[in-house]
Image (cartoon, rainbow, N blue to C red):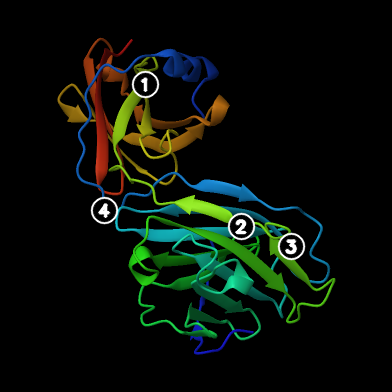
């Protein structure tokens, strides 16, 4: 539909519980130790979400949601959600009014200065800049990427580009057109529906930090096990760290290392994720002091907490 030097795009897949009393105690507990953290490798601002009318696409793929965010380098990421897997002959265009002036750029396209066209049939995309007459190949597209995502794969389309590729502004207005190769009635979906546009403002992406939210431990029984639990909080989303992070467990008793029986993430009520480490406690350790350390890590950051008890 747009003029075209096209580039290929990637098809990718984004594809012993602790006792309830212990989890409840953990959620209610307050943090008692500091955190150890290092600079994160990438910081992403919270996504801004947009919705579109559903069931109005006819034979085309139905755009239902869009989420946009950016990182500290100005790399934008746009996650477009569809009602079902994108059809095999879909052509999807994202129009970007990067100077946020509908009177400039392509006035027939709500002032778009740039456009990204995705051709599902050929697995190719085109990144164009409005030259006053048409969309010509943009001067640079080194940061532009397109990939399919979702579960099942193809229910989401991820489009990413840097602000340096689109005029270095502080945001943009945008709208989307999803078609089955034509723009005849019953063969397209525009989002938002009608003549409007969405608007996104560049966000300050504060450095990601992890902090200790809560910690607790179960009773240690000689000849049995000892479980220690930790909840860490992410500063970027406000959520608790979960399976995207890693857990490291170690413990000693009587001067010797304790065997790690299990380390895993447990999902508690309210979407809270809990890191759990369980150790074997030998019978001979009855009355002995036990010491454990749990570290959870994510993107180069870490939170560590230490625990002490006596085997019963």
Nearer the observer, 290 or 305: 305
Q: Position of residue 97 (x, y in %)?
A: 50, 65
Helix, strand or loop under label 3: loop
Which numbered disc, 2 or 1, marks the residue that appears first in the sequence?
2
Which badge, 2 or 4, comes first in the chain's sequence?
A: 4
- Residue designated by label 4: 41
Numbered disc in front, either 3 or 2: 2
The kind of secondary structure element at disc 2 is loop
Asked if disc 2 and disc 4 are in contact, CB closer than 8 Å, the reply is no
| The N terminus lies in quadrant | bottom right
The tag earlier along the polypeptide, 4 or 1, is 4
Other residues around mark 2 within 10 Å, as few (<14) / some (14–19) / many (≥20): many
Q: Secondary structure at mark 1?
A: strand
Residue corresponding to mark 3 = 62
Position in image of residue 180 (x %, y %)? 75, 77
Kindly report the distance in space between the C-alpha atoms of the residues bearing marks 3 and 4.
35 Å
- Secondary structure state at the residue bearing disc 4: loop
Judging by the rendered image, the residue that carries numbered circle 2 is: 197
Q: How far, Cα to Cα, is label 2 from label 4?
A: 33 Å
Left or right of 68, for residue 150: right
Mark 3, mark 4: which one is toward the viewer? Answer: 3
């Amino acid at each position: 539909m747009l003029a075209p030097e096209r580039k290929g795009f990637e098809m990718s897949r984004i594809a012993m519980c602790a006792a309830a009393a212990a989890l409840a105690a953990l959620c209610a507990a307050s943090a008692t130790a500091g955190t150890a953290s290092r600079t994160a490798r990438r910081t992403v601002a919270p996504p801004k979400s947009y919705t579109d009318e559903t069931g109005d696409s006819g034979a085309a793929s139905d755009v239902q949601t869009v989420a946009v965010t950016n990182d500290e380098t100005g790399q934008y990421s746009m996650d477009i959600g569809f009602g079902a897997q994108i059809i095999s002959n879909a052509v999807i265009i994202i129009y970007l009014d990067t100077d946020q002036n509908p009177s400039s750029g392509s006035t027939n396209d709500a002032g778009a200065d740039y456009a990204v066209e995705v051709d599902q049939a050929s697995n190719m995309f085109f990144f164009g800049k409005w030259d006053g007459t048409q969309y010509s190949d943009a001067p640079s597209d080194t940061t532009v990427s397109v990939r399919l995502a979702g579960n099942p794969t193809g229910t989401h389309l991820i489009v990413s580009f840097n602000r340096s590729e689109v005029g270095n502004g502080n945001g943009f207005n945008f709208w989307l057109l999803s078609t089955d190769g034509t723009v005849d009635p019953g063969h397209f979906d525009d989002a938002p529906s009608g003549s409007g546009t969405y608007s996104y403002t560049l966000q300050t992406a504060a450095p990601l930090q992890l902090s200790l939210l809560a910690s607790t431990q179960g009773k240690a029984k000689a000849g049995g096990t000892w479980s220690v639990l930790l909840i860490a909080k992410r500063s970027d989303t406000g959520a608790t760290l979960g399976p995207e992070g890693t857990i490291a467990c170690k413990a000693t008793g009587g001067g010797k290392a304790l065997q790690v029986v299990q380390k895993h993430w447990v999902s508690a009520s309210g979407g809270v994720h809990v890191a759990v480490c369980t150790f074997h406690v030998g019978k001979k350790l009855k009355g002995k002091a036990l010491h454990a350390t749990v570290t959870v890590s994510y993107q180069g950051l870490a939170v560590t907490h230490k625990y002490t008890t006596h085997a019963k």
